Image: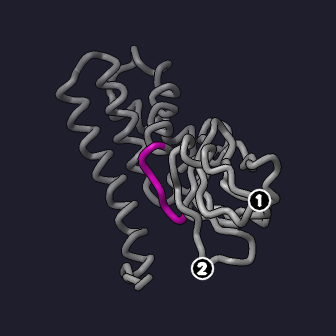
Amino acid sequence: MNYVEVQAQVAQWMNRSDLTDMIPDFIALTEERMNRDLRTRSMETNLAETAIVDGAITPASDVLDVKLIWPAGSDSNPLKAQSLESVVASDADGIPTVYAWRGSDLVFDGVGSVEGVLYTRIPALATAATNWVIQNAASLYLFGALAEAKLYVGDDAGAQTWLARFMDGIDQLNGNDNRKAGPLVARAR
């Protein structure tokens, strides 16, 4: 399935020719929701060793979030996420132990280099034509776009129906990845 086919499917399910021009917006809003709510292995990318400069690094513009980050060469010591205030206040000069977001930068309480695993945006169908979501869970686009269409026309009950199906799909994808990651293991400190 591709972008044109998704648009056609949404139009068919909406069964309203007066909203056809809005379908690209409904799809874009659906992708915005997916980028907020999904965190799966398909969204992961490695952060190669990156030097901390002036207390920060600037990840690629498509990075949404941090899965795990650690001092370079020390993947058994992951950094902890903290508030920006606490990271800035720590003003440490050693190996970093915590990080926080400051705009599009990641700031650290130390110096050196970091490595990690980051979550990236889902490639937008309007420019990528296809992506991993459409290949593995195309119904998310349909359910999300239909929810947006119902919201647009003021049908709150209809929107909730489609949004529930959309969120169920999101939960399933997130849950599938959690199950594939294996059981959580408690470690003594």
The span picked out in magenta is: 36-41
Query: Residue placed at 42% from the left, 39% from the top?
Result: 9
Q: Is residue 108 above or below residue 70?
A: above
Residue closer to the observer: 12 or 140 = 140
Query: Residue placed at 61% from the left, 63% from the top?
Result: 97
Please tell me how crowded label 2 is: few (under 14), some (14-19), or many (20+) other residues with Cα within 10 Å. Answer: few
Q: Is residue 45 above or below residue 165?
A: below
Q: Is residue 109 left or right of residue 42?
A: right
Q: Could one spot residue 11 in this view of the protein?
A: yes
Q: Is residue 14 above or below residue 60?
A: above
Give the Cα separation between the discs numbered 2 and 1.
Answer: 18 Å
Query: Residue placed at 37% from the left, 82% from the top?
Result: 186
SS type, badge 1: loop
Residue on which disc 2 sits: 76
SS type, badge 2: loop
Residue closer to the observer: 16 or 154 = 154
The location of residue 177, given as percent across then percent down, is: 43, 68
Amino acid tagged 1: Val
Q: Is residue 183 left or right of residue 7?
A: left
Q: Is residue 137 magenta?
A: no
Residue on which disc 1 sits: 111
Q: How is the image coloured?
A: one colour
Q: Is residue 38 magenta?
A: yes
Q: Is residue 55 left or right of residue 126?
A: right
The location of residue 124, given as percent across then percent down, is: 60, 41
The location of residue 105, given as percent across then percent down, is: 69, 43
